Amino acid sequence: MYKPKQIVIVVFIFTTISLSLSAKGNKDKNGYIGYLFAYFEGVVGERKEQEQIRFAISYDAVNWKALNNNEPILNSDDISQSGGIRDPHILRGEKGRMFYMVMTDMSTAKNGWGANPGIVMLKSDDLINWESSTIDLSKAYPEKFSNAKWMWAPQTIYDPVVGKYLIYFTIKYYENDKLDFYCAYANNDFTGFENEPVLMFSPKDGGIDADIVYKDDTYHLFFKGNSKDENGKQFKSGIKQATAKTLQGPWTEYFDYLDVYHDSRTNVEGSSVFKLNNSNEYILMYDLYSSGRYEFQRSINLYNFTSKQESFTKDFNPRHGSVISITEKELNRLKKKWGGF
């Protein structure tokens, strides 16, 4: 009995070390070797402490390690109007020269879910030092948005047609339960909008948490959508998508759900899609907010996804976050600043 156990242990250790070394040395054509996850915490600490930006890193996008011992890397009191942030989205800028983050300016700990002023915008050239600014939507654009209740889950994408960064987000007005997606181009300093936001896409039964990915001459907009009956009562929700040939649309809405939970009582939101390094696979990850879990499915073409969910290995409890690929230099810089593996 002793000898077989010894062999199993040796094989296990060898396999683990081999996989670890392979992951750490597996750079892709862009020099990417790992991943950075921007998120806010969903379990640890009081609500005010949870609504802060955090970072985690990984070599394989499945096994994750929180930086800074899962403590915030920025203080929400310093960067937001409300004292809290949610739904952080991180983007590597064109030619990799800058990094951008946008997030919901909202402290449910202090103010509840009634309303939020707008969004937080950040930029950095090293992923360590961040400059911040805020947009109060109703104050900046009172004629159109004085009665806006929510400005949620902003994200940024580069528009090559006009050479600018487009920020898109969900808007809800006080007098209307419909949730629609609006957008505006960021100004040159990435400190605000250069124009008043306009309607981007209006899903049939509303939607939140838009995430746009470009592949094969098509923009794929993933979002949490709903299905409602003729009386307006919701009977299903989950991750859906719409597609367009340009960011200006028109968007074609697909009514099939992509997540494995849409026919169950398990709720999902905050979907985010990213491409794996050295692979043609994409990861569709989402927040199972009522279950305290974070899971993902895979796709090659962004239309068809695996029919079985997978789980991350992690030492933190993320809520609605996003992922970018990073180089070895960037990963080491993050580890040096905030600690890692």
Image (cartoon, rainbow, N blue to C red):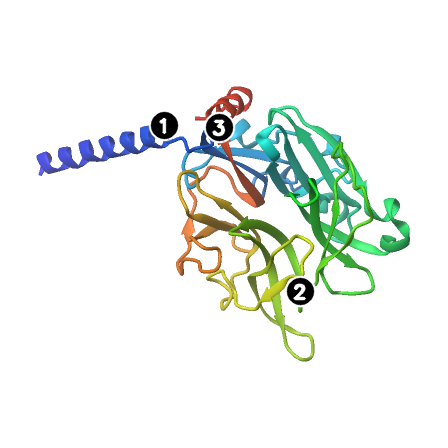
Query: Which tag, 1 or 2, sits closer to the chain's start?
Result: 1
Q: Which residue is mark 2?
A: 203
Query: Which tag, 1 or 3, sits closer to the chain's start?
Result: 1
Judged from this view, the residue extending furthest toward the top is: 336
- Callout 2: 10 Å neighbours few (<14), some, many (20+)? many
Q: Quadrant of the N terminus?
A: top left
On screen, residue 261 above or below 287: below
In the rendered structure, find residue 41 and report the number of the disc placed on it.
none
**Mark 1 element type:** loop
Using the numbered discs, state the Cα–Cα distance from disc 1 to disc 3 in whole angstroms.
Answer: 11 Å
- Circle 3: residue type: Thr
The answer to whether residue 95 is left or right of residue 170 is left
Residue 80 image offset from top left, x and y in percent = 75, 36
- Callout 1: 10 Å neighbours few (<14), some, many (20+)? few
In the rendered structure, find residue 25 and report the number of the disc placed on it.
1
Q: Which residue is mark 3?
A: 327
Query: Which tag, 3 or 2, sits closer to the chain's start?
Result: 2
Residue 311 image offset from top left, x and y in percent = 42, 48
